[in-house]
Amino acid sequence: MSPFLIVIIYLAFIGMGLPDSLLGSAWPSMYPELGVPVSYSGIIFIIISIGTVVSSLLSDNLNRRVGTPKITFVSMILTTVALLGFALSHNFIFLCIWAIPYGLGAGSVDAALNNFIAMNFTSKYMSWLHCMWGIGATVGPYIMGFSLARSKWNTGYAIIGVMLLLLTVMIYFSLPLWRDKNMVFKVLAGKKDPRSLSLKEVIDTPGTKAIMISFFGYAAAEQTVNLWASTYLTQTRNFTDSTAAKYAGLFFLGITLGRIISGFVTIHFNDEQMVRIGQGIMGAGVLMLILPLGNTVALIGLVAIGFGCAPIYPSMLHATPSHFGADRSQSIIGVQMAAYYVGTSAMPPLFGIISRKLSLGLFPWFLLLMLVIMILSHERMNYITRRWKFFRESVE
């Protein structure tokens, strides 16, 4: 394997992370210029999310037809075009139109690259892959902030669009490097059922429903913290806006640093153990928010939740071929990613409704509920797939 290939894959994931936080950081400057209510960011977000879910579900069929390298290249083109479209837009309707390729470009490449790493590399590479996304998601708002301070929000989108354009050119010239390492089709060769599975067949695969619920619960917890942590700290614990923003930002820094560390820890623990370790750390962090131990402990708890999230997502993805078989891994990862994006889109707004009707103080209890759902469904998946794997091996 060329070391340059893994660098290209990591750069692609940094590129995927760069736009993910742009809308939220730029929207306070965007909506007055566009002449729309502040709530309209949710419309763009939903369009992007729908496109991402659709392309995730199509990833298996696309991957079998054209392969991971071409999916990565085409997806980067779609994302680049969308970002440059945002940069040139001064009308809300045009932003909604450009949001379509924005979402379609994200889902299929996310699922395809995750499956590629899961099939061909050890768990540490998966952890570091998602660390790269965290770097992109962290750097993106800084680029937008730099642009807003000196120009307009369009400039931020243009800068990142050009960065992705350069990355897309690099991916194009790297396509020959994938040939020796594109093991997905080599693994599928000789299998009894190499065809693309229907959505019903995928969901009916033993353990799939359970792992989809687990991904949904993880996404709900992660993104609820992302959206509501700062508000929770200011309105229920009387932190200043600046302090709350700083510690809320440390949540994603905790995920990024945690994934760097996880890459080394995976040498000693398997994927299942890494998921449980992460869930335990998350649980400890949530308890620090629930128990009356003071604001300092609450802040430590928030960072601990980020560290706990770090190994869960990449380890669950990396374990997919082991749990479900190499011939089904791309299909399963596609629906896992779709479940993740549904959780990302649905649950943080749902908590917003709950907090408005009841109390923002329910924030840690909501996280605890999502964590319990994630743990129970993940353990259920482990139990089902162990039995199914034993059955498959006995038949073969």
Image (cartoon, helix red, strand yellow):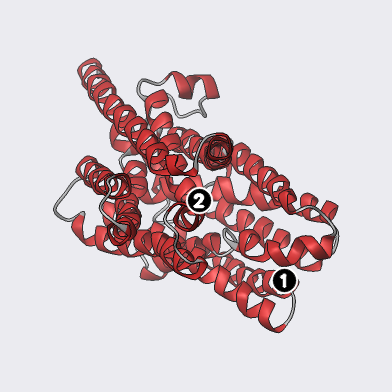
The residue under label 2 is which amino acid type? Trp
Q: Is residue 275 above or below residue 133?
A: above
Which is nearer the eye, 144 or 48? 144
| Dot 2 alpha-carbon crowd within 10 angstroms: few under 14, some 14 to 19, many 20 or more | some
At a point 78% along the width and 50% down the height, the residue shown is 96
Occupied quadrant, residue 321: top left
Relative placement, left or right, of 76 versus 95 is left
Which is nearer the eye, 388 or 47? 47
Task: Please tell me the numbered disc located at residue 45.
Answer: none
Give the x, y percent position of residue 352.
57, 41
Badge 2 element: helix
Q: Is residue 146 visible?
A: yes
Q: Which residue is mark 1?
A: 153
At a point 28% along the width and 52% down the height, the residue shown is 123
| Image quadrant occupied by the C terminus | top left
Answer with mark 2 or mark 1, whichever residue precedes in sequence: 1
Which is nearer the eye, 322 or 298? 298
| Image quadrant occupied by the N terminus | bottom left
Whole-angstrom CA distance, mark 2 to mark 1, is 24 Å
Q: Which residue is mark 2?
A: 228
Relative placement, left or right, of 64 versus 2 is right
